[in-house]
Image: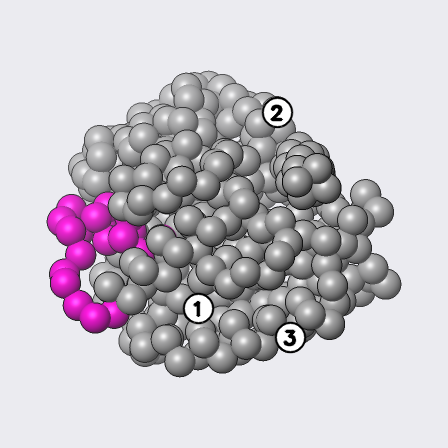
Amino acid sequence: MHVLVTADTVGGVWTYTRELVCGLLDRGHRITLVSFGRMPTPAQSSWIDHQALTYFATAYPLEWMQNSEAGIGASMHFLEGVIRDCRPDLLHFNQYCYSASDYGLPTVVVAHSDVLSWWTSVHESQPPQSGWFTWYSDVVSKGLGTAGMVVAPSQWMLDALRQHYTFGSSCRVIYNGRNESTFVSSPSKTDCVLSVGRLWDEAKQIKLLLARKHGVPVQVAGRAEHPENLSSADLQTDANVKLCGEQNETQLRALYSDSATYAATSRYEPFGLAPLEAALSRCALIANDIPVFHELWGDAALYFKRNDPDGLADAIRTAFEDPRRRQALADQAYERARERFSSQHMVMQYEQLYSELLGKGASA
């Protein structure tokens, strides 16, 4: 089958897209890929070298970006031309807005996150009334309501969509996946805590890790500048904390491999690829006590009191005072990641979903 997939190059959606697209190509499918947000870096696009893949890279804005209305309209016009020329069998959108148009084709919309659920999780209040929030809510509602299938990467994310938007489309949870062979574990892990995430994003809550002094080294990898206004996060650190900045995938793999423990500090996380990558590298997981982490990791993580820096500090101390328990947690997280969150399993589920939607279209 021929699937058109949209993506963005700003966050983890690009990693997810690569896993999915490469898996589909390996299974003999043809892919047209269109990316938005910003032009990909050479490192991001280095994997795009396949005769069955056609790629269109653009810098059109993403729907969650402020003042993106005109750019979204232009990108919709561009995408309509690509669909008309490429004539795919099915559309897989990783944004909401493009589903609102009627292409006469089966359509999948994947809800990686959304601004309303982000806002309520981060600010613990409803978003303010404004023209932009009204526009955004309308765009998402239309996209969800016209999709042939809405996919979420966790049950928590699907429930959050239903809480904030009204739509009657069919829904399904398909967990994200990563290729186990991409990650390795150092035979001599360093007694340190690693965390990965955008430092400017309040949802990632990296400040929790930096708010207290810890008895072991702390490393934080992630971009400090906001992609829209380039303002940097104001982070206070001590000598025991190393801010590594934005890291490429090779550098991140080395950090995961070398680190004994990973701290998942997010207060809003529809899935979380970084904890998965850490688990596949045999890091013990210390996770914020939020529902989605319990859904994904069960008893394979050590949880700290929700959004509490003292609770996080206590959990880190507990993990490093008991190396045997820490190793057991690392082993549990690794096995759970292999069993539930493999890229192969994810690709097979999407392939099955596409076949179902195409079958419905043929019988209609």
Q: Earlier in the sequence, mark 1 or mark 3?
A: 1
Q: Is residue 201 above or below residue 109?
A: below
Question: What residue is pinned by disc 3?
Answer: 81
Residue 39: x and y, percent? Answer: 57, 76
Q: Secondary structure at mark 2?
A: helix
Tell me which corner region of the image, top left, top right, bottom left or bottom right, holds residue 290. top left
Q: Residue at x 72, y 53 (%)?
A: 89
The magenta-colored residue range is 114-132
Q: Earlier in the sequence, mark 3 or mark 2?
A: 3
Instruction: Please check the rendered image and state whether residue 281 is part of the magenta-colored stretch, yes or no.
Output: no
Q: Amino acid at mark 3?
A: Gly
Question: What residue is pinned by disc 1?
Answer: 62
Q: Residue at x 73, y 45 (%)?
A: 23
Q: Is residue 146 above or below residue 275?
A: below
Q: Secondary structure at mark 1?
A: loop
Question: What residue is pinned by disc 2?
Answer: 339
Residue 249 shows in the view: no
Q: CA distance from mark 1 to mark 3?
A: 18 Å
- Number of numbered discs visible in the structure rendering: 3
Residue 246: x and y, percent? Answer: 47, 64
Q: Amino acid at mark 2?
A: Glu
- Tag on residue 53? none
